[in-house]
Every structure is written in structure tokens, then in C-alpha cells.
Image (cartoon, rainbow, N blue to C red):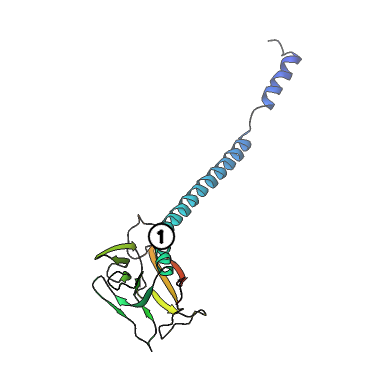
Amino acid sequence: MKPPREKERRGGRRHAATAFTLPEVVVVMALFSLLLTALITTQLVGLKMHRISETKLTATSEGREALTVLRDEIRSAKMLYVGNGNASSFVAITNNQAHIGNALQIWPTTNLARFVRYYVDANTRTLMRFTNGQATPVAGFVTNTLAFRAEDFRGRVLTNTQNHRVIRLTLEFYQWQFPLATAGQGGMYDYYRLQTRVTRRAIE
């Protein structure tokens, strides 16, 4: 048997030097596993944050729309009163009592038969808008009942009907963090609040 020539021996050594050793393969697999784990974790965290943001927007989007309409109606109102009411009745809070209630009644003109009433329905946890004999929901998942209050410019609750009073609306929402999850013990919930202060443009 002829001994290998010098050129062949050098070529074999060169080929052997280009191959991966077992420790190198293990290190590469470990790094790839860490990278894959990091990518999957990032994706799961992103999905979770998307779900939380989606729930917040769902819970408060109707409330924001309601605030926009309500602000316009208060600013252009001829008369308005804070009180307690529902779809069938409204009782304004009298003087010498804190003007805090679950309802706000707005008259755009001096015609007392034409009005808009906002009230929180404690049974359905919904902010309702009542006008022309029909009540429509404008915001759901509302947990606070006394959503309306009349204040002065410093934010102090009034006990009389000042002409330049400010109306504060506070909507508190309490909703699942993950709407598709089941309710019950161990369920995840979250809390949100929308608040605005509005006064009439035309102060008489």
C-alpha cells in the first residue's frame, strides 16, 4: 500500500478543519433556542398588550362619544339641572342639598316639553340618553351611579342653583381585561375612568 502523498494529506487536514465540532453544534443550538424563546415571548407579550389596549378602547369608546355629544348639549343649553331620574321621571335636587345625582336634564330652549335627559341605569350599568320618549344606551360597563354633579369654578359641589355652575360628568368602567375569558374567581378585571367638566356658553 502506497503512503499518501503530501498534497493529499494536506487536503484531508483542510477538509477536517472546516467541519463543526460537537461543542460548536451544542453552542449554536443553545443560542438558536434562546433566540427563538425570546421571539416567542416578545410575540406573546405583544398579543397580551394588544388585548389589554383593545379592551380599554372597547370599554371607553362609547363613553368618549357620549362625552362629545353631552358637551355640545350642555354648552348650548338654555336650562339644565342635576337630579335623580330614569326613563319615566326626573326630580331635580333642591337647594341646600349637594347637587349630585344619577341624572342630568337639559332644555335646549325655554320649551319645557322639549328636553334631553341623561341618566345612569343601575340595573344595566348603562348611561342612557332619553329624548322624544325614547331611551338609548350611550355607554356600557358603568359602575358609578352618581355620575353628575354641579360645581363652582374651584370644583366644590354646589348646594344651590348658580347660573354659572359647572357640570362634572364622571364615568367609571369596570371590565374584563380579556373579554373572551370566563368570569369568576381568579378572573382578570381592569378599571377605567372618564371625566369632563362643562359649562354653558350663554350665561344669563
Question: Which of the pair 90/142 is nearer the observer?
Answer: 90
Residues 43 and 71: in front is 71
| Residue 137 placement (x, y as % from top left) | 31, 62
Q: Residue at x 43, y 59 (%)?
A: 56
Seen in the picture, residue 119 relative to 20 is either above or below; the reply is below
Whole-percent x, y for residue 19 in the image: 64, 28
Q: Quadrant of the C terminus?
A: bottom left
Q: Quadrant of residue 82?
A: bottom left
Tell me which residue sits at (48%, 82%) in the image.
Answer: 156
* Identity, as a three-letter code, of the amino acid under mark 1: Glu
Structural crowding at the residue carrying mark 1, measured as other residues with C-alpha within 10 Å and reported as few (<14), some (14–19) or many (≥20):
few
Pick the residue in front: 153 or 172.
Answer: 153
> Which of the pair 97/44 is nearer the observer?
97
Relative placement, left or right, of 116 versus 17 is: left
Question: Which residue in the structure is indicated by mark 1?
Answer: 65
Q: Is residue 157 above or below residue 170?
A: below
Q: In the rendered view, tell whether residue 55 sits above or below residue 185.
A: above
Q: Is residue 34 left or right of residue 149?
A: right
Residue 192 spot, x, y in % from top left: 44, 66
